[in-house]
Every structure is written in structure tokens, then in C-alpha cells.
Amino acid sequence: MKKFFVIGNPIEHSLSPKLHNYWIKLNNLKAFYDKKKLNISELNNLIKEVREKKIDGLNVTVPFKNSVIPFLDKLSNEAQKTQSVNTIYYSDGMVIGHNTDIEGFELAIKHTNYDIVGKNILILGAGGVSPSIIVALKNMSAKKIFISNRTQRKAENLKKTFNEIEIIEWGTTPDFDMVINATSLGLKNDENIILDYPTVSSEKFFYDVIYNPSETNFLKSAKKNGNKIENGKKMFVYQAQASFKIWNNLEPQVDDKVMELLN
Ligand code: ATR
């Protein structure tokens, strides 16, 4: 019986077990996937269990995507570039940290039929997920990436790694084609992001990494003003698909049923 876990804190609301166990059953695999709430002091021992092959794979979520790195033997290029690990597996005697959020975002955009090539893109937030989005946008040939974060120092830190990004003061809006909410603002229903909606014309693409609630106020206002909108559900599903593929050596199906499962 293969064992997989998603680790984080808090973890109660993670939908990863539901999705992975659905695919496990569909493919008749002898495996189970559960969630584990951890403290940072427990990371070392858990990674040891991967090294001892007692655990076959881990997904990592907030707040451990970066803090897990010192306990790993090797990082993939994607994890190295972003300093963010969301998938852990054992291979050739080593515990390897990988990042499938990049692939998840790229596939999500592809399946939304939006062409990033030559676009000006504003990312709101410089937290855990932003480096993965920057790498994905670069892979997809975005023309220009702006970053705006309440705490400017964090945006400046990102610029140390990604020199080509331009920092925009929090609360101001440059001319953009697409805006991405990569903050946690909107997780609570009463939270709003201050964007100057009337001066933003109506043909922009508003993307929210949040998928629960499925329409944040950020997306609701954008839709009301006639813009294209998309939430983070596809990104979540495709990052999970990429992890599943690594661990089980088969590509699980993404279809309407999978999407409904997460409603
Ligand atoms: P972390 O910062 O630990 O990586 P995260 O959940 O990945 O956590 O990121 C949270 C993001 O949401 C950050 O960009 C954060 O901005 P700060 O760097 O200024 O904290 C942003 N965020 C959270 N609450 C916010 C608020 N009330 N107003 C503006 N931005 C907020």
C-alpha cells in the first residue's frame, strides 16, 4: 500500500486528499492519500520517513513550501528557481523536492485559452506562490511582469531573483493586459482589493489564485465591469495531476467530473 500526504498548517480545508483518492480509486491503485497538520519541528522526521520509504510522496502547502528545503537531498530546477517545493518524492537514494505549481499555472492558462505571449501582467502579492507564477509567465513569453505587494520589501526580495520584474507601489495600477491576485485577500468573503476598476478598461483578464470562494470580490467586480475572469481551480487540479504523475507514473484524467468533485 503506497502512502501519500499533504502537509501544511492549517490543513483542514485542503482538497488534495479528495482529488488524489479519486484518481487512486479510478486507476485501481493500492494507495491512500491523507492530510497531516504539522509544526515546523516535525518536518525533519517526516522527510526521514520518505528517505526510509515509509512514505511514498508528499505535497507541501502553506507555510512549509520554502522551510522544507533544508531537509531535502536535492531540488529540481523548478524548485531551485522558485525556492518553493510543493512535491516531494524519493529517487536514486535521494529525497527530491520539486515544484509543480509552475506547470499547474501554465496548464491552467492554456486550458483557459488565453495567450500570454507579448502581454503586460500585473501580479498582486509577493508571497509563497508568486515566484512560481513569475517562472510560468516567463516560460509563456510574457512581455512585462509588474509586481505589487503591500510590504514592498518582499517585492524587492523577489526582484533579487527575477531582475526583469518591475515593482509597482501597492494601490497603484499600471497599464496591464492581465492581473493576477496572488495574495490571500479574498479568502474571506468580505475582503476587497483596492483596484481602480473604472479606469481599467473592460477587456482585461482577471485571474485569482484563490478557488474557494469560487468568485472572490476581485473576480466579481471584474466580471461586472465586463472583463474575462478565472479562478485558481484549474491551477490546483493541474499541479495535483503533475504530482500524481511523478509518484504513480501515470497521468490521471482531468475532466468535468474532476472539476465537479471540487465544488
Ligand atoms: P507568505 O507571505 O508567508 O508567503 P502567503 O499566504 O504566501 O504568505 O502570502 C500572502 C500574500 O498576501 C502576501 O503578498 C501578503 O502581503 P504582505 O507581504 O504585505 O504580507 C498578502 N496579503 C495578506 N493580507 C493582506 C492584506 N490585508 N492586504 C494586502 N496584502 C495582503
Image: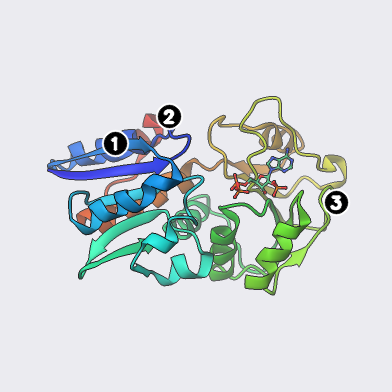
The residue depicted at 76 percent of the width and 67 percent of the height is: 166
Q: What element does badge 3 sit on?
A: loop
Gap in Å between the C-alphas at discs 2 and 3? 35 Å
The quadrant the C terminus occupies is: top left
Location of residue 131 (image quadrant):
bottom right
Residue 1: x and y, percent?
Answer: 12, 43
* Residue that numbered label 2 is attached to: 12
Q: Nearer the N terminus, badge 1 or badge 2?
A: 2
Q: Does 213 appear above or below 106?
A: above
Amino acid beneath label 2 = Glu
Q: Residue 142 location, x and y as percent?
A: 63, 67
Residue holding disc 3: 172
Give x and y (percent) for residue 70.
43, 63
Seen at 40% across and 50% down, the residue is: 238
* Vertical arrangement, residue 53 with respect to residue 134, above or below: above
Mark-to-mark CA distance, 1 and 2: 11 Å
Residue 91 sits in which quadrant?
bottom left
- In the depicted view, which residue is nearer to us: 94 or 16? 94
Q: Nearer the viewer, residue 119 or 156?
A: 156
Measured in 3D between alpha carbons, the distance from the residue under mark 1 to the one under mark 3, in whole angstroms, is 42 Å
In-image side of 153 versus 169 (left or right) = left
| Ligand number 1: quarter of image | top right
Left/right of residue 83 with respect to residue 24 in the rendered view: right
Mark 1 — residue?
34
